Amino acid sequence: MKILVAVKRVIDYNVQIRVKEDGTGVVTDNVKMSTNPPDDNAIEEAVKIKETGKATEVVAITVGEEKAQETVRKALAVGADRGIHVKADGILEPLAVSKILQKVVEKEKPDLVFMGKQAIDDDCNQTGQMLSALLNWPQATFASKIDVKDNKLEVTREIDEGLETIEINVPAIVTCDLRLNEPRYASLPNIMKAKKKPIEEISASDLGVDTSPRVEQIKVEEPPKRKAGIKVANVAELVQKLKNEAKVI
Amino acid sequence: MAVLLIAEHNNKELRPFTLNAATAASQIDSEVHAVIIGNDSAEASKQLSELPVIKKVLSVEAPHYENFTAENFAPVVVKLAENYSHIICSANTFGKNLMPRIAAHLDTSQVSDIIKVISSDTFIRPIYAGNAFATVKSNDAKKCVTIRPTSFEPCESSGGSAPIEKIDAGEEFSNTKFIKREEIKSDRPELGTARIVVSGGRGMQSGDNFKLITEIADKLGAAIGASRAAVDAGYISNDHQVGQTGKVVVPDLYIAVGISGAIQHLAGMKESKVIVAINKDGEAPIFSVADYGLEADLFEALPQFMEELNKLNTIQK
């Protein structure tokens, strides 16, 4: 079984986001970037499946500017076998990314495609579902547990009401929740070894995919700020304030 | 052209956020139709037809729609889409799972999780865990939009009498099979719509200790929330998680106990009307969004809180 894992480079989840004064977006210059957190879970799961002998190859792919390749290199350092970097500049919408992934899937013919359930920058939560639509493959979104059986996966999904279990036939798409596993750290020797693993570079235009945005970003602004609150001295004061000042209990 | 709302339900009744999505749909266009896809879901269809904002209900029933599988649902909506300018659904796990599958089939770039309708093509949506608001304009002919339910009031639930039109079911998608759903049944209010939410974090230290929170929640008629740290640690099940990748809640009162206030958690609760933080670390970021902060050991504060509540003559429910 061959697993393709899509990873995205985003502003690190610990960075305090700052909105640009001209309203065109958020500040990304000199800001720490990392792999989108649930994409790390997707890589980890693919590598774990390979370690059990149920997968033969793990291929990491990213779509984006030059520096996006760092995320593929990181995936290689934790166990992916080779990488693909589809180069594309500017804002990439999930629809464009899923069309690019579709082209790569048609060429690579993986049995499974994994990715994070949502990117923490645009918070769209679309790419996996869109890719499975384009391929007409089954989708298991928000996966918190994956059991690989012969040509089938049993996947536990996190839904608003609790948990749902579905069985999907391969080929299939799985989008991963943060609770799926605990991503490993890359060891120094593995980071060195990853430098020798191949990364194929393709340009989005060579794949014949038009990546121009369909949704115009008119402005980006700071959300309204909350007024500073007060510290109360003790529980009795807290309950009094809630009862008599805020009138919520 | 009219707007098509996808109803969320459990085959017996509408799920509450359908009413919030209906409000959003009616802000885009006054002509709102709703499609309900299910199995033996006549009662839910009837409820849908009683929403005054809905002008027509399209009902599709078949056994393979019993479990809301996106692979079965998407083709139904795609087929109907030619008559509509917009497809609308809630951005909860139902809509998040389904809508992109529809959008890709329609070659539309979806607009996810809007919090405000500016015009029929322009919307405001939070990005970066709500640390920025983006105003976006969709240039696609057909628009697929998911709405953040807590940002729209529920519509009236009675008084309407829209006609219900039966439409033919599509084929079953055979590569996805539903196995089971484990719903956590509770007598407490639903987390997404509760007036008061009491949430625990890593500071609770164990699942057992959550009973301190349960007690207070019961007293206040509140729902119980949790930070991701508490769910990851196994203190409580995932359906309680509040945050960027969990549920977004906007209660009148949110009480955060032993929650430090990571950006990802704040994304799910900082629009609450009144926020209380109880934490022994006075520097915890949760205090920066709290209206009332109490710097205290939660294991002392929660029993005292319960005592103080017991002293009150009346408690709003």
Image (spheres, coloured by chain):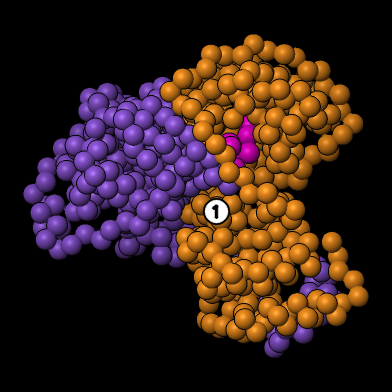
In which chain is the residue bearing label 1? B
Residue B2 position in % (x across, y down):
69, 22
Looking at the image, which is closer to me, B180 or A205?
B180
Residue B160 position in % (x across, y down):
86, 28
Residue located farthest toward the top when viewing the structure as drawn: B168
Residue B106 position in % (x across, y down):
50, 22
**In magenta segment, residue A16:** no
For image coordinates 65% across by 84% down, the residue present is B300
For image coordinates 47% across by 42% down, the residue present is A156
Looking at the image, which is closer to me, B11 or A37?
B11
Residue A243 position in % (x across, y down):
83, 74
Instruction: Give the side of residue B114 with respect to residue B50, left or right.
Output: left
Residue A132, can we see it? no
Q: Quadrant of the N terminus of chain A?
A: top left
Instruction: Give the side of residue A1 with respect to residue A23, left or right.
Output: left
Within 10 Å of disc 1 (Cα), the crowding (few <14, some 14-19, many 20+) is: many
Amino acid on which disc 1 is placed: Asn
Looking at the image, which is closer to me, A3 or B284?
A3
Say if B238 sits above or below A108 in the image: below
Q: Quadrant of the C terminus of chain A?
A: bottom right
Q: Which residue is mark 1?
A: B238
Say if B53 sits above or below A160 in the image: above
Instruction: Give the side of residue B233 with respect to residue A229, left or right.
Output: left
Say if B295 sits above or below A20 in the image: below
For image coordinates 25% across by 26% down, the residue present is A109
**In magenta segment, residue B93:** yes
Look at the image and give the residue range highlighted in magenta: B86-96
For image coordinates 45% across by 65% down, the residue present is A16
In the picture, which chain is orange?
B
Chain A in the picture: what colour? purple
Secondary-structure class at tag 1: helix
